[in-house]
Amino acid sequence: MIIKVCGMREADNIRKVSELEIDMMGFIFYPKSPRYVQMISARAGIIPDYSEERLKRNTGKEIPVADPVKQPLRVGVFVDDMPQNIITRVFNYRLDYIQLHGKEPRETCENLRRTLDPDIRKGIKIIKAISIEKLDDLEKCNDYIRVVDMFLFDTKCKSVGGSGQSFNWDILEHYTLDIPFLLSGGIGPEDATLVKSFHHPQFAGIDLNSCFETEPGVKDVEKLRTFIREIREE
């Protein structure tokens, strides 16, 4: 199961959460969000890649690495942003995924991939967030067939994500596309058993945010550690 921790901002907190067994880390580039990333502080907190391949490329020498660091994949979260702003942040942050959390049309996804891959960021992946309140909301997914790599199903609310509210997961029984999805919206420390009991052929993982915070943008590392341990247990 993919575990994505989103809404990261503070350098020390980013380092500590990166050391947990997570797969993705989300950085929100939406100025109206209380978790909005400022360029300098967020970049300072991303753990460098100490892989042998990168060290060799940077130094020209074979350097043994005793404790290579496994970095979470970097996800940039954008809300109806200008394509040039997205492209700039993909380059500056070396993002692995773009998460579009607004009303971006299919054409935006196509244009971003065409511009970025392969010249700027080869293999860039795109996640499209879909806000869910009722069954009809799933129909929006049809607009993104063959242009996104993954969906993220979040709770429809007045704010743009991070509300701490959940939606009725039973609605997803009617999701029949072959595109995998992440489950988001109000997943908290007490929900490990609930998450493990949820089954769907395209269910790829979970997105964690506000319910694990001590304040907007700062995650409770111990709560995350305990929850992840419970999720990973067979």
Image (spheres, rainbow, N blue to C red):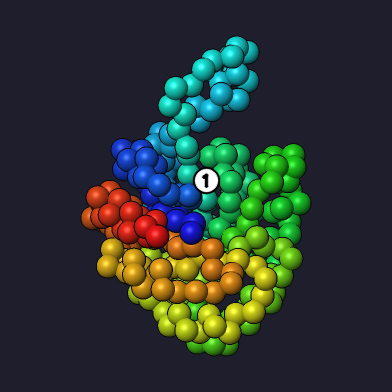
Between 6 and 228, the one nearer to me in the picture: 228
- The residue that mark 1 highlights is 73
Q: Where is 87 relative to 223, above or below?
A: above
Q: How many marks?
A: 1
* Mark 1 residue element: strand
Residue 30 visible in the displayed image? no
Can you give x and y, in whole percent of width and height, for residue 98 in the image? 58, 54
Left or right? Give the position of 186 relative to 101: left
Residue at the location (45% across, 32% down)? 69
Q: Nearer the viewer, residue 64 or 128?
A: 64
Give the amino acid at mark 1: Leu
Query: In screen coordinates, is 178 left or right of 212?
Result: right
Residue 100 shown left or right of residue 225 in the figure: right
Instruction: Provide residue 199's location: percent of width, then percent of height.
Output: 49, 74
Query: Of all residues shown, which one is farthest toward the front?
Result: 234
Determine whether 190 is above or below 140 in the image: above
Residue 215, percent across and down? 25, 55
Determine the residue positioned at 54% across, 83% down: 173
Does residue 53 appear in this view? yes
Quarter of the image for residue 109 reads bottom right
Please provide percent x and percent y for residue 38: 41, 44
- Circle 1 crowding by C-alpha within 10 Å: few under 14, some 14–19, many from 20: some
Outermost residue, top side = 61
Q: What residue appears at the point 66 percent right and 75 percent down from the top-left corner?
A: 177
The C terminus: image quadrant = bottom left
Residue 37 or residue 148, whichever sits in front: 148
Q: Is residue 69 above or below residue 187?
A: above
